[in-house]
Amino acid sequence: MREHETRVVIVEDQPLYRSMLRTLLESHGLRVVAEAGGAAAARAAIEPGSADVALLDIHLADGNGIGLGVSLRRADPELGIVLLSSQDSVELMLDLPLDVRRGWCYLSKSSATSEESLLRAIAAAQRGETMIDPHVLRGLTRRRHSSLESLTDRQFEVLRLVAQGLSNQGIAERLRLSVKSIENHLGSVYAALDIPAEQNQRVAAVLRLIDETVREP
């Protein structure tokens, strides 16, 4: 992680929403280093190494945020990506190429995303982790005959909190458990999901959560 104040770029085609994001981020001490209303303008404005995190609208008039994010990440492997979507299309995260999967987060505009969730997503993306909008995670249940069914209720709860961008310390505080207990639960989760240690296990586990859950009717 680069050691300086967090630098953010915003790619959003609605000027008012883009302005609101800038005001919010700057009020929390983050530095907005570039803005763009489309994919072409973003590619021209964002130089590799100039930012730590990019907030990208998925649906742009001249392209999409995922394709843009992939090209930006390949040019700058340390760049974190936060996708903003007006539709609940989190499953698009599963189509990310393997070489760029770390450090992507997903927030839904329709969920009236809170400041806390936005800031947590930016921090998670900068750390190379994956976070999913807590609103999107609500109501998800394990798909039958999936590997998630082998998890205990506590393990599944811990995995959902990982997906919300909480650190092990944050999860421990939320569940009133020790950090060591959370580490043990996560070790069991990774083993049950057969996620090897050489992968980014937190990212892989969150993507598995997306892939093997369904929304309750």
Image (tube, helix red, strand yellow):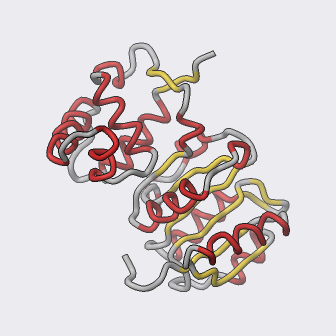
Q: Position of residue 102 (x, y in %)?
A: 42, 58
How far from the left and from the top, in percent, is residue 32? 63, 80
The relative height of residue 33 versus residue 80 in the rendered view (above or below) is below
Left or right, 105 with respect to 4, comes to right
Q: Is residue 21 above or below residue 120?
A: below
Q: Nearer the viewer, residue 122 or 178?
A: 178
Residue at 82% from the left image edge and 63% from the top image edge: 62
Q: Pick whichever, 44 or 90, lies toward us.
A: 90
Residue 174 at what x, y percent from top left?
A: 34, 42
Q: Is residue 212 above or below residue 179?
A: above
The residue under the point 14% across, 46% down is: 180
Q: Quadrant of residue 36?
A: bottom right
Q: Quadrant of the C terminus?
A: top right
**Residue at the spot 73% in from the left edge and 57% down from the top edge:** 64
Q: Residue 1: give x, y in percent of width and height.
A: 37, 75
Q: Is residue 82 left or right of residue 155?
A: right
Q: Is residue 13 found left or right of 76 in the rendered image?
A: right
* Residue in the image at 54% along x and 80% along y: 7
Number of numbered markers: 0
